Each structure stands twice: as C-alpha cells, then as structure tokens.
Amino acid sequence: MQYRALGRCGINLSEIGFGAWGIGGSLWKGGSDVEAMKALHRACDLGLNFIDTALAYGQGHSEQLIAKLKKERAERIYIATKIPPKNQEWPAQKGILVSDVFPDHHIISCTEQSLKNLGVEQIDLQQLHVWSENWLTDLGWYNTLLKLQKEGKIARFGISINDHSPDSALEVVRREMVDSVQVIYNIFDPTPARDLLPLCREKNVGVIARCPFDEGALTGAITETTRFEPGDWRARYFTKDRRKEVVARIEKLNEILKETGAATLSELALRFCLSRPDISTVIPGMRTVSHVNQNMPVSDGIKLSQDILDRLALQSWPRNFYD
C-alpha cells in the first residue's frame, strides 16, 4: 500500500480508502454487517488507514460499524464523516440559503452524534455533505466549524462537492478555507483535472476522489439486463436506456484495457485516479472481502502511461445520472 499526504493536514492516507456508504445498508442491498466487518478488517490488514463515512449512511449505522472496527484494531485509522443537509436535499439546490441547510445548531448536533456513533473524542475530518458556492456570502457554517475545531471535537474540516460540479469549490479552495474537498473523479468525469485539482495542488488542499467506478458502470458489471433488488438506489441511477448507454461506452474502454496491463476495468478505473499526484486518496465503495481483495492491490505505485491517459481522456462522458 502506498500513502499520500492529505494536503496541508500533516497526515498520510492510504491511496485507496474505504468508501463506507454501502455498509450503511439503507440504499444498497445485498450486503450484511458480518460481511462488512470482514471487509473492513481485510482492508486494514492490507494497509488501508482511511475510511470515509457519513451520518446519513444508514442513519449512523455505517459510523457504528466503523466504531466497532476501531475497538478491534490497534493501528491508527483516520475517519472522515459528513454532516447531512438539514433540509435532506442532495445535492444542494440553487438559491437555497446556507442557514436553511447548515445552521449552527445542526452542525453542532450532527457532529456530537457522529462523535457518539464513532466512539471517539475527535473526528479526524468533518465535511459538509453538500456544497454551494453562494454560501461564501454567509460564513456562519465556517465559524461554527472553526469553533468545533478549537474545542477539539474535529481536527480538520472540508466539503463534499455536489455531483459533477467541481468548479463550485474553486473559490473556497482559493481562499484556503477548507482542508480538503471530496469530488467525483473518474474516467467518465475527469473535469476536476481542468481547474480544481491544479488549484488544490497550488493551495495544498487535500483531494478525496469519490465514485471511481461511476456507481458500478466502470467495473463492467452493468449489462442491459442488470436488475437491482427492491430499494436499491442504483435502480434509479441506471434507469431507462442508461444501462444500454453504459454497455456501449464500456466496449470502447475494453479495447483500451487490452493494451494497459490492467487485469480488469476496475483496476483501470482506479489506476486512472491514482495517476494524478494531486489526488490524496480514492474511495471506492467496498462492502465485501472480494471488493477489498480486488481493489487494494492496485496501490502499487504503477501509473498509467501518458498515451493511455490521453486515450482515456477521449472517453469522457458529460452527463449526470444523479438528476
């Protein structure tokens, strides 16, 4: 396992972190707590030291599983969590006031609940779960996070950027107000590399790359006949003709895959992310030991060639399936 600095935070994170949305269990089906714990332990056995979760993941269930893990492990594990929007709207809607989404009392109460769920006295990285650039006109959220930091309840704080909206974070990064940003970055959506990633490198802000597999599309596991269990949110993500569109795109990627030395599309997708030195860590969702065994070995220091990266750049696919 290779490790990278989280910007100016003074800590080194495993290049591959554990995306813990799926183990929350509410919107992802087909997993179990027993398997989730096995996956968490296996990931740590292989050198993982960073887990990204959120209070909203299973209404705290994901955090509670991580608390169990921390009690059973001796090594240092860094935990990032997130404060859900008070109005329960993902992503943040245009024009909404930050006082309606992240009022002071909400930030404080959610942080207190996460501390309790995680069984810790300090959260390593607290994040706002949605973001709007308009909120820079009202810094109540910022002052409240600074207060929590001064009290020792959070060590660092950042933002999780709205789906496919990397430029919305440019100004907050430019002002050096946050320690990290979490952003969608993958083969289909490499747009953060245009402006956000270079700015984060300049300002020494950590970057957490989420959705490296585009919710499963970039694993090659989605076919035209794929069906999801009732209640699984991916049935909405891959609705209508989207599965057919994914299959057509994956066929082109499979042609490139043959020339890379990568064994699977999943490996190619992770190597694409890790080929950017300005990304601190990438957090694929992992719910099973097989997920962990497949993903963790990709952190071996081997980067994709510039030729392959240039060809993958031609496979970008501007769209937003979250809408």
Image (cartoon, rainbow, N blue to C red):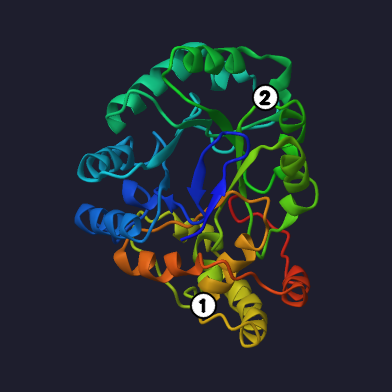
The residue indicated by pointer 1 is 224
For this view, does 323 lie left or right of residue 174? Answer: left
Q: Nearer the viewer, mark 1 or mark 2?
A: 2
Q: Quadrant of residue 36?
A: bottom left
Q: Element under label 1? A: loop
> Looking at the rendered structure, which numbered label has been put on residue 209?
none
Q: Quadrant of residue 138?
A: top right
Q: Is residue 59 above or below residue 110?
A: below
Mark 1–mark 2 contact, CB under 8 Å? no
Percent coordinates x, y for residue 288 in the rendering: 31, 63
Name the amino acid, label 1: Glu
Q: Element under label 2? A: loop
Between 292 and 108, the residue placed more toward the observer is 292
Between 192 and 16, the residue placed more toward the observer is 16
The residue indicated by pointer 2 is 177
Residue at point 33% right, 35% down?
59
Name the amino acid, label 2: Met
The first of marks 1 and 2 along the sequence is: 2
For this view, does 227 lie left or right of residue 89? Answer: left
Percent coordinates x, y for residue 256 in the rendering: 67, 83
Between 148 and 54, the residue placed more toward the observer is 148
Percent coordinates x, y for residue 111 in the rendering: 41, 22
Percent coordinates x, y for residue 177 in the rendering: 67, 24
Q: Is residue 1 above or below residue 265?
A: above
Between 243 and 11, the residue placed more toward the observer is 11
Residue at point 70% right, 25% down?
95
